[in-house]
Image (cartoon, rainbow, N blue to C red):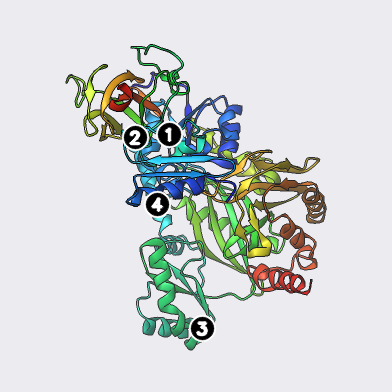
């Protein structure tokens, strides 16, 4: 096994998702893959994720690199490629319209700085009047909201950055 | 979800690969703004470089991206598109997409949902053909049981072929030469149809031994006016998948051609057909008769050969018909000139039973020159994805006559360089260099019964 294709990776992740395993670490000559189902898991992770990971159908924890010391309070789409702080990025599962509150006029599910748990509801994604509620997927603190309410988001676009409980200690 | 109020047309391209590229080009020439929907796997494709905007709608798997009508509609509405081109394959012939467009005030570049339904079901299409006076092969209504099938087969006369009522592509098709054949294969055919289309209903037709696949390219204005762009001969098929198409069909005598065109025009004008469509016929060379097969309610892969011999741009015509209610095509303005041939370049290995061969293209050089056209969205370093159809290019040549077109095709095939993946280039060369092809003595089973066995035999001798 020398070269891992995106199809290999996709199959691998499907198998992993169905398995009882919590983590999977695979290393070949050319690449290294680290999969984890534990949202708080951090130890042993590397930042050597390649683009193929973007097709991931399962939640994957990303360790982002710390290039700036402070987080920006403003939603910023451009931050997707150069995350500014370490944490868990919640991404859009498909194209759709992003809503921060359960219905028009209602208060947002969460605000910047709020603490969330793995099953906290954080936003809605709407596709042709079908609304999907998204959960945080990890516990921690919302330190960045990348998208404005009512904006169109693309598949895999970053929505929130969550500083996980473990990473804050 | 508040598109800017604007009367200028804006087109959503709901496809990928060469057809998406081709549609984007045609739109650009007409000054129409374009939005492409792409899967994660295609987000950096060559097509994204020729459109005004790309929206990544979902992961690589087609059912979560190109086959998800809701995602595509959401993208169209949110980006302020006024029209949508479905290309071919994917959702192009699903009435649901056309219907969603109608409900959301987006012009579908194609027929109405009603027309797609009317011609999409083969039995309903056969009824339409009968009403329009288009000849059919001696065939049957729905056949439920083996006994019923045997009865009908004996009335029609062997050989007969079973076909699935709900779809094409060869699934559910079995040729039977006698009662034994039919009793043995009927249940399997029905089961295959059920698996593929969710409907195991079959019907029977008389099977023509020396059959040609011919089809007429049409364009309708939705008000009953339908014009034709002559016919194509697409007899070279492997497992009912076309590999080489040419226009015109030299095998058909002129008086029969006239009747063929009229039959196709009559059929589509009877349903006020809108936009581009094709009526496919089976042509019996011995009897010089044609029989209706099916209607393809979309632009087809092989449309370029018709464009070449009529000097028209069918994709542009599709877009113009959609943006301009008064756009008219006049039959007297459509004249046939020369001969065109298209071959489909496919990422597959002819030496391994045509197994798909995805991977990265390490070198790509497409032929050029007089009368040579290549429709493709590939270049050096493109990754041929395992997720989608493996056709990577269409090579189209035109000459003043069939012989000249063949000479140009030979030269162009020799010039084509594709490295890093396996392709069917060598197989296409074998077709073009074969005397049966050069003398135009082929039929729909020639590839499978003559060429492929010959090549396999010579390979095993090596």
Seen from the viewer's position, the closer of residues B393 and B64 is B64
Residue drawn at the location 49% of the way across and 56% of the way down: B295
Instruction: Name the residue beneath numbered marker 4.
Output: A15
Q: Nearer the viewer, mark 1 or mark 4?
A: 1
- Find residue B157 and name its label: 3
Mark 1–mark 2 contact, CB under 8 Å?
yes
- Find residue B291 and name its label: none
Seen from the viewer's position, the closer of residues B300 and A10 is A10
Instruction: Name the residue beneath numbered marker 2.
Output: A41
Q: Nearer the viewer, mark 2 or mark 3?
A: 2
Seen from the viewer's position, the closer of residues B44 and B142 is B44
Q: Is residue A11 left or right of residue B312?
A: left
Q: Do discs 2 and 3 share a chain? A: no
Q: Is residue A82 left or right of residue A37?
A: right
- Marks counted in the figure total 4
- Residue A91 found in image quarter: top left
Q: Residues within 10 Å of mark 4 (few under 14, many from 20)?
A: few
- The residues bearing labels 1 and 2 have C-alpha atoms spaced at a distance of 8 Å
- Subunit under mark 3: B
Residue drawn at the location 55% of the way across and 44% of the way down: A28
- The residues bearing labels 2 and 3 have C-alpha atoms spaced at a distance of 71 Å
Q: Residues within 10 Å of mark 3 (few under 14, many from 20)?
A: some
Residue drawn at the location 60% of the way across and 32% of the way down: B25
Instruction: Name the residue beneath numbered marker 1.
Output: A45
Measuring from the top left, give residue B374's x and y in whole percent. 70, 42
Could you tell me which quadrant the N terminus of chain B lies in?
top left
Q: Residues within 10 Å of mark 1 (few under 14, many from 20)?
A: some
Q: Earlier in the sequence, mark 2 or mark 4?
A: 4
- The residues bearing labels 1 and 4 have C-alpha atoms spaced at a distance of 20 Å
């Amino acid at each position: 096994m020398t070269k891992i294709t995106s199809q290999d990776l996709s199959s691998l992740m499907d198998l992993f998702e169905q398995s009882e395993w919590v983590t999977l670490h695979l290393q070949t000559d050319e690449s290294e893959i680290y999969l984890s189902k534990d949202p708080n898991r951090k130890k042993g992770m590397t930042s050597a994720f390649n683009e193929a990971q973007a097709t991931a159908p399962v939640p994957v924890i990303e360790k982002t690199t710390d290039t700036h010391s402070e987080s920006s309070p403003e939603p910023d789409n451009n931050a997707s490629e150069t995350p500014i702080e370490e944490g868990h990025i919640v991404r859009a599962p498909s194209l759709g319209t992003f809503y921060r509150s359960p219905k028009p006029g209602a208060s947002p599910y969460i605000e910047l700085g709020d603490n969330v748990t793995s099953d906290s509801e954080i936003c809605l994604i709407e596709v042709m009047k079908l609304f999907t509620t998204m959960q945080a997927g990890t516990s921690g603190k919302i330190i960045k909201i990348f998208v404005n309410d009512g904006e169109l988001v693309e598949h895999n676009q970053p929505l929130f950055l969550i500083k996980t409980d473990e990473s804050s200690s | 979800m508040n598109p800017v109020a604007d009367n200028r047309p804006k087109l959503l391209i709901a496809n990928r690969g060469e057809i998406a590229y081709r549609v984007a080009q045609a739109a650009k020439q007409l000054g129409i703004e374009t939005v492409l929907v792409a899967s994660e796997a295609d987000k950096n494709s060559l097509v994204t470089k020729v459109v005004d905007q790309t929206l990544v709608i979902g992961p690589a798997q087609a059912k979560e991206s190109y086959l998800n009508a809701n995602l595509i509609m959401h993208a169209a509405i949110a980006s302020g598109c006024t029209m949508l081109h479905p290309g071919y394959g994917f959702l192009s012939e699903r009435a649901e997409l056309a219907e969603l467009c109608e409900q959301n005030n987006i012009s579908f570049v194609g027929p109405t949902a009603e027309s797609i339904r009317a011609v999409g079901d083969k039995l309903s299409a056969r009824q339409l053909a009968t009403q329009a006076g288009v000849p059919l092969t001696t065939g049957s209504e729905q056949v439920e049981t083996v006994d019923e099938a045997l009865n009908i087969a004996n009335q029609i006369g062997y050989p007969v072929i079973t076909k699935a009522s709900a779809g094409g592509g060869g699934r559910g098709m079995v040729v039977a030469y006698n009662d034994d054949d039919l009793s043995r294969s009927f249940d399997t055919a029905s089961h295959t149809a059920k698996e593929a289309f969710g409907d195991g209903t079959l019907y029977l037709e008389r099977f023509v031994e020396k059959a040609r696949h011919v089809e007429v390219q049409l364009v309708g204005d939705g008000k009953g006016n339908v014009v034709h762009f002559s016919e194509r001969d697409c007899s070279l098929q492997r497992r009912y998948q076309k590999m080489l198409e040419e226009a015109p069909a030299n095998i058909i005598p002129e008086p029969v051609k006239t009747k063929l065109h009229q039959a196709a025009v009559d059929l589509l004008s009877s349903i006020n057909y809108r936009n581009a469509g094709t009526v496919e016929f089976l042509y019996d060379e011995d009897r010089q008769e044609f029989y209706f097969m099916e209607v393809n309610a979309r632009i087809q892969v092989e449309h370029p050969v018709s464009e070449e011999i009529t000097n028209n741009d069918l994709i542009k015509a599709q877009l113009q018909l959609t943006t301009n209610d008064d756009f008219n095509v006049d039959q007297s303005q459509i004249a046939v000139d020369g001969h065109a041939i298209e071959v489909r370049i496919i990422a597959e290995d002819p030496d391994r039973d045509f197994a798909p061969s995805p991977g990265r293209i390490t070198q790509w050089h497409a032929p050029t020159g007089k009368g040579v056209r290549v429709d493709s969205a590939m270049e050096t370093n493109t990754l041929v994805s395992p997720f989608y159809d493996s056709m990577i290019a269409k090579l189209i040549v035109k000459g003043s006559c069939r012989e000249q077109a063949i000479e140009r095709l030979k030269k162009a095939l020799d010039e084509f360089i594709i490295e890093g993946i396996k392709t069917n280039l060598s197989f296409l060369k074998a077709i073009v260099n074969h005397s049966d092809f050069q003398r135009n003595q082929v039929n729909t089973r020639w590839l499978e019964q003559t060429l492929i066995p010959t090549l396999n035999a010579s390979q095993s001798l090596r």
